[in-house]
Amino acid sequence: MSNIVPTDDTSEKPIKINKWETNALKNALDDACKKYFKETLNFTEDYKLMDGRLYISLIACLFSVFALIYDWFNPFPKSRSTLIICVIAYFILMGILTAYMQFIERGRFYTGKLVDKTGIDPISRCTISSKLKKYDDKYDLTLEYNDGTNKATNSLQNISKSVGNYFDENGVLCYDRFTSDVKKMYLQARMSERKVK
Amino acid sequence: MEIFSFVDDIKRMDKRQAIYQVLNFGMIISTALMIWKGLMVVTGSESPIVVVLSGSMEPAFHRGDLLLLTNYEQEPIRAGDIVVFRIEGRDIPIVHRVLKIHEKDESYVKFLTKGDNNQVDDRGLYSPGQLWLEKKDVIGRARGFLPYIGMVTILMNDYPQLKYFILAVLGFFVLVHREN
């Protein structure tokens, strides 16, 4: 049961979560998927999507900090116009953030690229998104694979299974079962990409 | 122990996830702050929501009631209005009713206040030598009220450790809980 790989302890200890908490389930599966792609398949993660979210949040927080400091030094009636601008800007940014997470991110939690060390094969890209509805047990994992040769074609592969397949009674994640499904999905994606050409 | 399962959760978070948790916490605080500043701008008052601290306005307002204030320039203060004012040198605002007004050409107003439940007017409360209040002392006029809700604020002010404890616990849970 225990892995004999001599890496640091926290990453090899099996993940144990509260099996009734939907969020914890989704996060554990997403993390395991990311780990598989990073360590086993040697993909490098592309952080653009996450960075976008971080920048929007950062700018929103900066507006509010600015409003706070400005109002501290120029008590209320004088700071009125600055406050109006900051408040409106803040809520617009909140709207942008919500729209960003809803329409642009769309559940995509990992974007990676595989750079071939020999430089012969072009860079292949993977984008993975997942969905797990609030009180549902079906975990839906979608992989968008693009072989660097033809930028236009993307092959989509999908696993939709109950989370009961991957967690045991105590809420411990069975990493190997999950990654074997992920591996199957990945190989299918590569094959179908090649067939399309 | 299951309660400490979040500790593993934290260890599994990568750098960007951790930054997002902090920003998420910042955004929650910022949203509350921006709503408060927005209210300040909309009502024109520097403290749009106040809590009644004493029983001097009973039976209208009791200790622990929440008041919504507005402070519009265009609406002049008239006798009978309930105003919240601050006396120079003291920082606790007072909620009382306006008794008498002296007005000179619309720009200069001075008025006298008295709590409904008090026997005498507020001259005893004003600064030594001050007989009237002016527009600049007024934080706003009471426009709406919510009973009992302000008791939470009174409790937090009487027991500041309780306030810091609750804030620390809430902050901790926000920082640790991953929602994505």
Image (tube, rainbow, N blue to C red):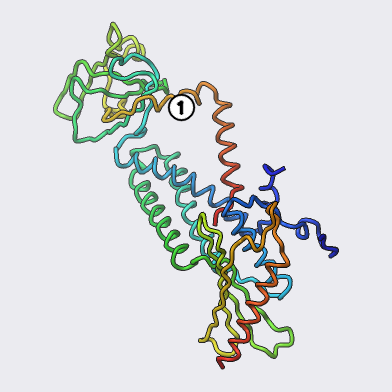
Residue at the spot of label 1: B152
Report which quarter residue B32 is drawn in.
Answer: top left
Report which quarter residue A184 is drawn in.
Answer: bottom right
User: Which percent across, then down, holds residue A29?
Assistant: 63, 62
Q: Is residue A50 left or right of residue A16?
A: left
User: Which percent across, then down, holds residue A104?
Assistant: 46, 68
Identify the element where label 1 is drawn.
Answer: helix
Closest to the observer, A187 or B21 = A187
Report which quarter residue A22 is drawn in.
Answer: bottom right
Closest to the observer, B128 or A115 = A115
Closest to the observer, A158 or A137 = A137
Outermost residue to the bottom: A197
Q: Is residue B159 left or right of residue B11?
A: left
The residue shown at (49%, 52%) is: A62
The subunit carrying tag 1 is: B
Q: Amino acid at mark 1?
A: Val
- What count of labels does the image hold? 1
Closest to the observer, B145 or A1 = A1
Q: Is residue A195 above or below residue B72?
A: below
Q: Is residue A94 above or below residue A125?
A: above
Q: Is residue A186 left or right of residue A66?
A: right
The residue shown at (59%, 86%) is: A192
Q: Is residue B163 left or right of residue A116?
A: left
The residue shown at (70%, 53%) is: A16
User: Which percent across, then down, holds residue B49?
Assistant: 36, 32
- The crowd level at tag 1 (other Cα within 10 Å; few <14, some 14-19, many 20+) is few
